[in-house]
Image (tube, helix red, strand yellow):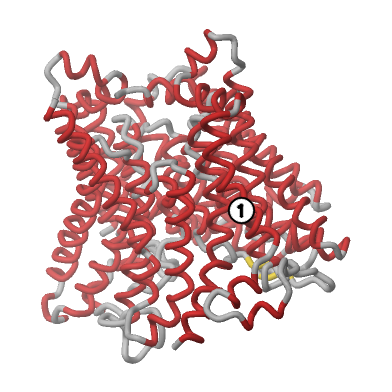
Amino acid sequence: MTAAAGTGQAMGRERTGAGVAVRAGEIVRLLIPVLIAFAVGALVLLLIGENPVDIYTLMATEAFGTARRTAATLSAATPLLFTAVATAICFRTGVFNVGVDGAFVVAGLAAATIGFALPAGLGLWLIAIALVASAAVGALWLYVPGYLLARLEIDEVVTTLMLNFIALGLTGFLVNTVLLSETSGNNTTDSIHQAAELVRLMPPSTLHAGFIIGLLCVVAYGIWARLTPAGMEAKLVGLNPRFARSVGISVPATIVTVMVISGVVAGLGGASHALGQVHRFSDGFSAGYGFTGMAVALLARNSAVGIILGAVLFGALASAGTTVQLFSDIPLDIVNVIEGTVMIFAVVELGRLTWRRRRRR
Amino acid sequence: MIALVEQVLASSIVLTTPILLAAIGGLVNRQGGVVNIALEAKMIAGAFVAVIAGAATGSWLAAVLAAAFAGAAIGWLFSLTITRARANMIIAGLGLNVLIAGLVGLTMSVAFDASGTLRLDGVPLLPKVLPEALAAVPLAGRALATLDPLTVFAWATVAVLPFALANTRLGLRLRAAGNAAPVARATGLRDKSLIDLGTTFAGFYSGLAGAHLALASLGLFNEGLTAGRGFIALAAFYFARNHPVGTALVCLLFGFLDASQIRLQTAGLPPTLIGTLPYVMVIVGLVITALNTRRRRQAT
């Protein structure tokens, strides 16, 4: 497994090499939302009588101080790798898919169900079946709004937003009825078989093989976006659908395709979280990973390297935020303040670009 | 049986009010060109401010006004990011929801040393408009007796709104700015300020919605108080395609679903599934509308 980790990281670095073409000015612009967000966070900390420098230093040490803490950070970053890629695929095509969270949740339930319901004797096959099934569930989940947008021009923001709530209701219903565990109380399924658990990379930390699957998704996304004709076509549809149509790209087909790929990635994310992190499905399965992933994708401006950095940043905030809450009086809500500010300022900066994109029809 | 109908009717009306107030704000905002996805944020802020202001002043009116102005202020700032800094309204709205939830949670734990639920002494509840004796009237009596000022205000707005949007200068200008900003600008209207006005209005009404949630019967603030009602409001005016009266009726239906959830649960229907009905309805509604438009287009 460590060998696999090595390959994943090596490939990641390769992509970094290709991405260095980004100009310095670009990098500064990319950092602005983060800087503003940390400034807002610092202001809030000052208002409540804390020293922001001390708190930020504490958070940095908590997030990266030791190998074990770094592992915890990467573990918290894992679901974000998936949700950010799933979001970025759509955003760069000009499709405002805000339904990654819903796909993550339904696919997570599918993976967990396979993980405990199929015979444990299947061994590693159990993981393979669960991954394929959850990718299919995620794909199907987002195919619906994709089809509605492509064929009937139904606003994808509304449908995907509504589907998130439907996902919560549906899974909430299932884990309280047919899939309810008989032994572990309310709102949860049985634990998955040990054979279905993704391998832990650095025990005792919860960092698991899902992190590598996530990195592979980011790398695959980067290659798709930069090097394949399909990725290029999707980008053109995002930039100017009329132009795309006139050069012979099928806009509806592209929209459906990116939504399905987005569903596959979100679905794999749900499976990784179920099989690697929580080992079951219970209510509150996604702690807003879909939305944090959106913040990551916006921050990264859909670039693969940016997604890795952004996911690690938010993973660090989440894991350090929890410990800081334990050891000082700073509530975890500070992480929400920073995340919300990042989202707002990422688009304030992006303003003109996204505005033009929105006028595609 | 009659007692049951009376109860469901009364609680449907109470539960409709917050959804309706937020939906009114959202639909005016939508007519003015903004899809306001941050109604939830302003409801949370409104509920939070209402409880604090209520405890501080002991007056329900002061609490309600404070909530409304807090919502309006947040709405105005939100609007500036859209109109002046040209932020994408969907992302900025989702960001605002996260940000406000964080700020409210932070304030609650730092200033009040509470987490999750904020209970303060002396928070006034909304008064009843009509005398208690009305409850004796069969069927509607109980609903009439529970009417509070915000419910009356919400329905009064629904009554005035079609006229205000179709026949007043401000209403027409707002819709012009929302539907055809370049045209509005060409005729000398300040389109951005009009859009700001619409978003501030949505904030005001969402603040009221939050105040109603906190002060109608609870008298306290809870982080889960809004429970997605800002999005249900969004579903309502999307489903009714921005028609004020239609939106109000859809809100009434959602309020009824909310009120009957517990009773339906005892009849064997799962509450979580019923809770998703508004969202399913919107998607189905949008599909039907789109199919109709397409058929009409093909017919001509």
Other-residue count near label 1 (Cα within 10 Å), few / some / many at <14 / 14–19 / ≥20 = many
Q: Residue at x 32, y 41 (%)?
A: A156
Which residue ends up furthest to the bottom in the rendered image? A183
Q: Residue A310: give x, y in percent of width and height.
A: 47, 41
In the image, residue A186 sits, relative to residue A309, either above or below, namely below
> What residue is shown with label 1?
B154
Q: Residue at x 60, y 30 (%)?
A: B81
Between B195 and A172, the residue placed more toward the observer is: B195
Q: Residue B135: give x, y in percent of width and height.
A: 64, 80
The chain letter for the residue carrying disc 1 is: B
In the image, residue A316 sits, relative to residue B4, either above or below, namely above
Q: Quadrant of the N terminus of chain A?
A: bottom left
Count of labels in the image: 1
The residue type indicated by label 1 comes to Ala
Q: Residue B221: give x, y in percent of width and height.
A: 69, 66
Q: Residue at x 42, y 30 (%)?
A: A301
In the image, residue B100 sits, relative to residue A300, either above or below, namely below
Q: Residue A159: give x, y in percent of width and height.
A: 32, 47
Examine the rendering and report whether any part of residue A344 can be seen: yes
In the rendered image, which quarter is residue B59 located in? bottom right
Q: Quadrant of the C terminus of chain A?
A: top left
Q: Residue at x 45, y 56 (%)?
A: B249
Between B53 and A227, the residue placed more toward the observer is: B53
In the rendered image, which quarter is residue A105 located in? bottom left
Between A272 and A334, the residue placed more toward the observer is: A334
- State the SS at label 1: helix
